[in-house]
Image (cartoon, helix red, strand yellow):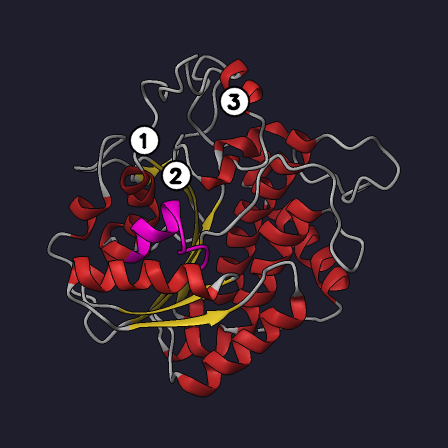
Amino acid sequence: MTGKFGAGTQADEVIEGVNLSGKTAIVTGAASGLGTETARALLKAGAALTLPVRNLAKAKEVANDLASSTGNNQIHLEEMDLIDYASVRRFAASFLKREQKLDILINNAGIMACPLRRSPEGYESQFATNHLGHMLLTNLLVPALLKGAPARVVCLSSIGHRLSPIRFDDINFDTTPYDKWIAYGQAKTANALFALELNERLATKGVTAFSVHPGGIMTNLQRDMPDEEIRAMGWVDENGKVREGFKTPAGGAATAVWAATAASLNGHGGAYCEDCHIAEPARKDVPFAGVQAHAQDKEAAKQLWAVSEKMLGEAFNF
């Protein structure tokens, strides 16, 4: 499915003519990069935003800039760390107490290619943060999403999903050597599969979910990567200039904003999107686009849901 937008589209273009007045949205990871630009676009359209953040002081500076640049000061900040499930629960409880409904949830925050770290429960950190933290947050917020129906959930995946399906035999690298890129790929596949299964469970109740690949962008997501590795991958040259073809943060935010608001996506819940359209199946002759079958596998999505519930110690039956 294609339309008037594409790889060069900016978030401002997507939101032009969209009215989100009276709508409530949450964007995770909005203190920098894609999250900031996603929040900016939603604010420009009139939405009221709640931004769960790890660093309140930093986020306040960003919030002031967002309010000033958009003329919309409907921004509420609260502390939350996705790898700290107690903090996720506190945030969700606070939101449900404060707000009647939730119209848009954009699960944007994430970590990438970091050294082996583990959550307090012993889970590999990329899976624990990118997938489990967002799954817990989303499912705790379902009551508000149902009240906001028709509501949308957007999960940031990545072309990195191509690197690995879910390693159900050793998700946490307990028995096999840790590979930071395989771990990242698994986590991004999990984001896509979570959106797929969430949509299966909630679409008939008015809540649809999508996963998106934002495109290649240089942001804080690369913070765990040494400069020499970034250069070796061809993302920047020896002078630090970003490779041609990489998107701006506002360009990277465009697909998430589109997935959250586009009327043309009605009836297409569960889809994996890129460049403001539903992605085609991956092909070997197209290396930087498309979705692998393992990230749209409904049986794997069901299995991941069940495994994740056990890891989180809670069942979510909608």
Q: Looking at numbered disc 2 in the image, what kind of residue is underneath it?
A: Pro
Q: Which numbered circle lies on residue 230?
A: 3
Note whether residue 292 is visible.
no
Residue for badge 2: 214
Give, as a single range, the part of the protein colored magenta: 27-39
The secondary structure type at the circle numbered 2 is: loop
Work out whether mark 2 precedes mark 1 in sequence or the reverse, and give the earlier one. 2
79 in relation to 240, above or below: below
Q: Is residue 141 left or right of residue 215?
A: right
- Residue 175 within the segment the image draws in magenta: no
Q: How far apart are the alpha carbons under marks 2 and 1? A: 9 Å
Q: CA distance from mark 2 to mark 3?
A: 18 Å
* Disc with the residue nearer the chain's start (1 vs 3): 3
Element under label 1? loop
**Residue type indicated by callout 1:** Lys
Cβ atoms under marks 2 and 1 closer than 8 Å:
yes
Q: Nearer the viewer, mark 1 or mark 3?
A: 3
Residue 130 image point, x, y percent: 58, 50
Instruction: Assess whether mark 3 and mark 1 are in contact (beta carbons under 8 angstroms).
Output: no
